[in-house]
Image (cartoon, coloured by chain):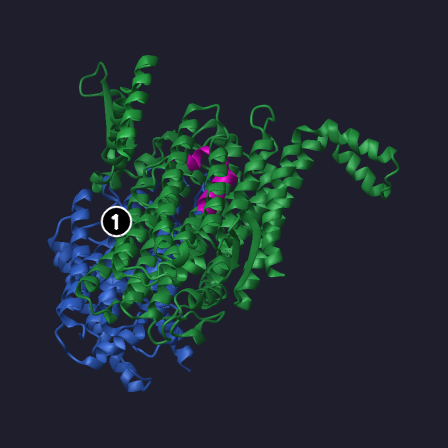
């Protein structure tokens, strides 16, 4: 029963991801005094892309063609181990939170390689920059997550979130640090302003877009969808780890329905904050990103240390 | 029986050494065989024809090379068998050989720890012997003598096996020196080039300094043992004061660390590994470094008695330095084998860090978590042996086909060498510790160990270990970036040189089989880590005296070392999920043949004329890292711009980059100057004038007479 539910929850995750992207775009447009596209526009774009014939460069190898599927599968797997609306998630046991970070690394590894596969300057540039940023972001994310796992003394996301839920509302200084670290990492990893601009195609500023410049058709659709899932994953991680209230602990339909509403509310609020930040901030120079991310790393480490020094029960 | 297999491994590797000496004796052997036939030695006709063919001048050389490597391969197989059976039966086998000193026969002991290293080394040796015949086939006997290569390879491998069996200090040191000296000759194999001779000499000096430190370390324990016995059994019963134990620990760390390549005593490693033939570098990096690890574990966990947490902290800090330093320097190399050598420094650093964690937990009274760390360290050693061997052998294939090791002269090899490129990709994914591959599992176990820090009371340790975990996370991320660069620049994109353009897939089946064997093991161990971990449990019971907290959860499917609620990983499920998700999306999107993909030109911004010079190479790829972590290296960057006739325009740019190791200028050059200065002062005594020497003797005589009276 709960395996079936885990499956349905993963499907829900995948299905909702483009909606979140549309919601962020809608708010950004409104904040910038532009007319907003429909919330469903990302779905239409994906559908359109899947019906187009993909073009592949003569110089590309099998790795270029396989990468969209690999990236998409890695994101689906990541989505399947993150509790979305219920913490009773059997798949969470098959891959804990360190493996979750591993899934991200897996997808990024192939995406960077695919960028270098065609042999253009853009691909290599994007790959190099993406690897630089993620090298700094990944440890920061692990530090933030370790704060959670050490508090709950479990690296299993479902049981860790369950532990935080059980404890009720407690103000933990370590969680405040970890929350800020996690937000900074999420911005960097999902390629949002001020680190990267998802809407740009200007050579000198592209990071993520430079890597996937050669993709078209269904390959591009998979990669775009995977990015949407990644954005949603970070959103769900932030809202369910730091504000888990509302998540269902059993399979009662009313609890599940309430949990879904709560989740949508939390994500909607987070997305509004993201849109405001993206409107208010300017993109940073590439070599300022390191300061941004070292700050995240430091916050994560401070969170971990403040947990150990202030909170651990000794 | 098990001991027989262990001895067989040694005898076979020595046998391969002796066989290699026959390579120039083709005429003698052929006439000898003819004479034997004349004298009426009767053989079945098929065998007679086979031997006669093998002894013919045309194929004698390759047949003998195959025989030598067959012998070595059998040594590897028997070592695997011996190792696995000793691990499964959990026995401790002792023996004595009546060799060596009159009052100290060579003591032999085969237990779980040496059994595990027997397994690692057997696997590596077996893979190398599959690879070898194809690799050395084209060697010119006059220039690069196979006799020398085969002789010292055999002695080197035999020496390694003997180190693992040794159960007294004397035998241990003999075997250790056998290994060091044989590997010196292997490093200086292509001695025609001055750089190789220099690298080999550096290696010899550092190996011998390390050996002296180990001897002194043994000496400290022996000094406290009853009746000055040099057997390890006597050492185990010896009680040392904490001070003297710490002295012995520092000596052992210096000695074994020198061989393992810990920063800052790693400098021989990036010099020596690239100049040896590739299958030898694979053995040195995959195997010899592990023997140093074995030595340190044996010395600290068994012989020294009680572990102190301060030692763990020392290992943790030095390990973190090595891990970060190793990967930072690896990123800046463009010689593939040099890069891999630095990456070995990184991996050894990770292993020592986790070993340090294990020591800390052991001293703080948490043996079950110490066992977890200990197993993570050994598991990483096992994994490193697999993927580093694969990478070095892959480098050998590439050197063989592209005639270069400079990664910036390659590119596009994925199309020209389809099999090699896939196997190399597996190695890159394993070393970048991506899920589903073996490197990830040991990394995961290491994090699980570090996350148990809240059981420790000591405040310093409680805040130190998370910092170490942060360093470990950074190391893993940097390693991923480093190997994306390696694979991307070497195998993807457009060919960057004529050689790369003309490269072809390797024809030799044996070389591909060796790579496939190692790649298959990397994947298999990544999916079913339980099979290695259950063996490691026995080692941990023997050394730490404690098994994993949650032994029941170690099965083929789940990995939950502490408890299922706290942490678990099921790689088979993950694999199933990936296949399901990838398969469904692939099938769904591919169902319409009208939208099959079309090959076109690469997008070139409408200008046309894309060429291979426009791609990122490794120097460009690493530029952001060079900017961000600028102080890590000693960078020597020169940009020469020539302006053209048109103002504000540049016609020509020359970019030069040299990356130096800090440790040379900060540590080794001062030592060199000191030694040189001392030697000069001593040199003043030697005037070359016989009268002065007679005066020295006279003064000494008078002085001694005065002392005696």
Q: Secondary structure at mark 1?
A: helix
Residue B172 falls left or right of residue B133: left
Residue sitting nearer the eye, B590 or B304: B304
Instruction: Give the colour in which the image draws chain B.
Output: green
Residue sitting nearer the eye, B261 or A129: B261
Q: Quick check: A51 above or below B677?
A: below
Q: Quadrant of the N terminus of chain B?
A: bottom right
Residue A164 falls left or right of residue B431: left
Residue sitting nearer the eye, B103 or B605: B103
Q: Indicate the chain on which mark 1 is placed.
A: A
In the image as oriented, which residue stretches furthest toward the front? B709
The residue sitting at 23% across, 70% down in the picture is B454
Magenta segment includes A257: no
> What residue range appears in magenta?
B271-288
Q: Quadrant of the C terminus of chain B?
A: top left
Residue holding disc 1 = A133
Where does residue B317 sit, x and y in percent of width and height? 26, 52
Q: Which chain is blue?
A: A
Q: Main secondary structure of the magenta part?
A: helix
Q: Is residue A90 visible?
A: yes
Image-quadrant location for residue B679: top left
Magenta segment includes B287: yes
Where does residue A290 sit, x and y in percent of width and height? 19, 47
In the image as oriented, which residue stretches furthest toward the left? A280
Q: Quick check: B77 above or below A239?
A: above
């Amino acid at each position: 029963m709960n395996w079936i539910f885990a499956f349905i929850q993963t499907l829900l995750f995948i299905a909702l991801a483009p909606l979140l992207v549309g919601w962020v775009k809608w708010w950004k447009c409104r904040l910038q005094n532009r007319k907003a596209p429909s919330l469903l526009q990302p779905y239409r774009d994906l559908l359109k892309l899947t019906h187009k014939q993909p073009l592949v460069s003569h110089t590309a190898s099998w790795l270029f063609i396989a990468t969209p599927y690999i990236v998409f599968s890695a994101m689906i797997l990541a989505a399947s181990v993150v509790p979305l609306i219920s913490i009773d998630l059997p798949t969470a046991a098959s891959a804990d939170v360190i493996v979750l970070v591993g899934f991200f690394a897996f997808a990024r590894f192939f995406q960077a390689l695919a960028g270098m596969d065609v042999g253009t300057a853009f691909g290599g540039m994007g790959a190099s920059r993406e690897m630089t940023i993620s090298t700094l972001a990944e440890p920061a994310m692990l530090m933030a997550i370790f704060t959670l796992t050490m508090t709950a003394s479990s690296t299993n996301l479902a049981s860790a979130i369950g532990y935080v839920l059980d404890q009720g509302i407690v103000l933990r200084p370590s969680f405040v640090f970890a929350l800020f670290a996690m937000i900074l990492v999420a911005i960097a990893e999902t390629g949002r302003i001020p680190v990267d601009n998802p809407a740009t195609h200007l050579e000198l500023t592209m990071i993520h877009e430079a890597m996937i410049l050669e993709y078209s058709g269904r390959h591009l659709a998979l990669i775009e969808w995977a990015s949407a899932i990644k954005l949603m994953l970070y959103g769900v991680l932030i809202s369910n780890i730091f504000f888990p209230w509302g998540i269902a602990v059993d399979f009662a339909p009313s609890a599940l329905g309430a949990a879904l509403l709560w989740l949508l509310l939390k994500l909607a609020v987070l997305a509004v904050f993201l849109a405001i930040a993206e409107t208010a901030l300017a993109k940073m120079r590439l070599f300022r990103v390191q300061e941004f991310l070292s700050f995240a790393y430091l916050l994560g480490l401070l969170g971990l240390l403040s947990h150990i020094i202030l909170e651990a029960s000794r | 029986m098990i001991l027989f297999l262990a001895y067989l491994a040694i005898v076979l590797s020595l046998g391969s050494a002796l066989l290699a000496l026959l390579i120039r004796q083709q005429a003698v052997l052929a006439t000898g065989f003819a004479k034997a036939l004349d004298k009426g030695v009767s053989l079945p006709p098929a065998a007679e024809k086979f031997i006669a063919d093998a002894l013919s001048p045309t194929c004698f050389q390759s047949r003998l090379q195959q025989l030598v490597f067959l012998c070595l391969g059998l040594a590897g197989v028997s070592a695997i068998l011996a190792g696995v059976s000793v691990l499964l039966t959990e026995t401790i086998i002792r023996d004595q050989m009546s060799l060596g000193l009159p009052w100290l026969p060579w003591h032999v002991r085969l237990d779980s720890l040496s059994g595990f290293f027997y397994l690692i080394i057997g696997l590596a040796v077996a893979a190398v012997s599959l690879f070898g015949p194809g690799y050395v086939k084209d060697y010119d006997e006059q220039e690069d003598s196979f006799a020398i290569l085969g002789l010292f390879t055999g002695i080197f491998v035999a020496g390694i096996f003997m180190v693992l069996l040794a159960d007294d200090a004397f035998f241990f040191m003999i075997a250790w020196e056998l290994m060091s000296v044989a590997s010196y000759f292997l490093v200086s194999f292509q001695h025609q080039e001055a750089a190789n001779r220099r690298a080999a000499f550096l290696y010899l000096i550092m190996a011998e300094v390390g050996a002296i430190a180990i001897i002194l370390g043994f000496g400290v324990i022996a000094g406290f043992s009853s009746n000055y016995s040099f057997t390890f059994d006597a050492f185990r019963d010896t009680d040392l004061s904490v001070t003297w134990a710490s002295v012995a620990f520092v000596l052992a760390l210096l000695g074994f660390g020198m061989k393992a390549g810990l920063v800052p005593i790693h400098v021989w490693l990036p010099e020596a590994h690239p100049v040896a033939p590739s299958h030898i570098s694979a053995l040195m990096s995959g195997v010899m470094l592990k023997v140093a690890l074995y030595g340190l574990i044996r010395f600290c966990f068994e012989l020294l008695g009680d572990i102190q947490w301060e030692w763990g902290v020392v290992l943790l800090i030095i390990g973190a330095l090595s891990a970060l330093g190793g990967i930072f320097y690896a990123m800046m190399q463009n010689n593939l084998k040099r890069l891999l050598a630095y990456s070995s420094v990184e991996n050894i650093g990770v292993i020592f860090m986790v070993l340090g964690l294990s020591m800390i937990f052991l001293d703080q009274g948490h043996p079950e978590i110490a066992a977890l760390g200990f197993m993570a360290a050994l598991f990483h050693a096992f994994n490193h042996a697999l993927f580093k061997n694969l990478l070095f052998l892959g480098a050998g294939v590439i050197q063989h086909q592209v005639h270069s090791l400079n990664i910036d002269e390659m590119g596009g090899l994925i199309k020209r060498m389809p099999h090699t490129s896939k196997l190399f990709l597996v190695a890159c994914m394993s070393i970048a510790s991506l899920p589903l591959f073996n490197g990830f599992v040991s990394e995961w176990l290491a994090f699980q160990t570090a996350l148990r820090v809240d059981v420790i009371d000591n405040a310093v340790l409680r805040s130190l270990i998370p910092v170490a975990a942060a360093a470990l996370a950074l190391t893993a991320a940097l390693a991923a970036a480093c190997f994306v660069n390696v694979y991307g620049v070497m195998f993807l994109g457009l060919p960057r040189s004529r050689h790369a353009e003309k490269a072809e897939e390797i024809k030799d089946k044996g070389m591909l089989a060796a790579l496939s064997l190692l790649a298959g093991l990397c994947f298999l161990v990544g999916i079913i880590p339980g099979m290695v971990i259950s063996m490691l449990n026995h080692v941990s019971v023997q050394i730490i005296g404690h098994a994993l907290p949650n032994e029941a959860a170690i099965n083929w499917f789940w990995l939950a070392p502490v408890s299922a609620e706290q942490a678990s990983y099921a790689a088979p499920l993950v694999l199933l999920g990936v296949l399901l998700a990838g398969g469904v999306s692939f099938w769904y999107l591919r169902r319409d043949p009208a939208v099959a993909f079309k090959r076109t030109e690469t997008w070139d911004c409408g200008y046309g004329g894309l060429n291979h010079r426009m791609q990122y190479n490794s120097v460009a790829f690493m530029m952001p890292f060079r900017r961000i972590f600028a102080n890590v290296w000693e960078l020597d960057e020169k940009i020469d711009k020539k302006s053209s006739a048109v103002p504000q325009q540049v016609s020509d740019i020359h970019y030069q980059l040299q990356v130096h190791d800090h440790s040379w200028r900060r540590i080794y050059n001062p030592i060199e100057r000191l030694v040189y200065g001392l030697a000069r002062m001593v040199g003043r005594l030697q005037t070359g004038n016989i009268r002065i020497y007679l005066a020295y003797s006279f003064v000494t005589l008078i002085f001694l007479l005065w002392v005696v009276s």
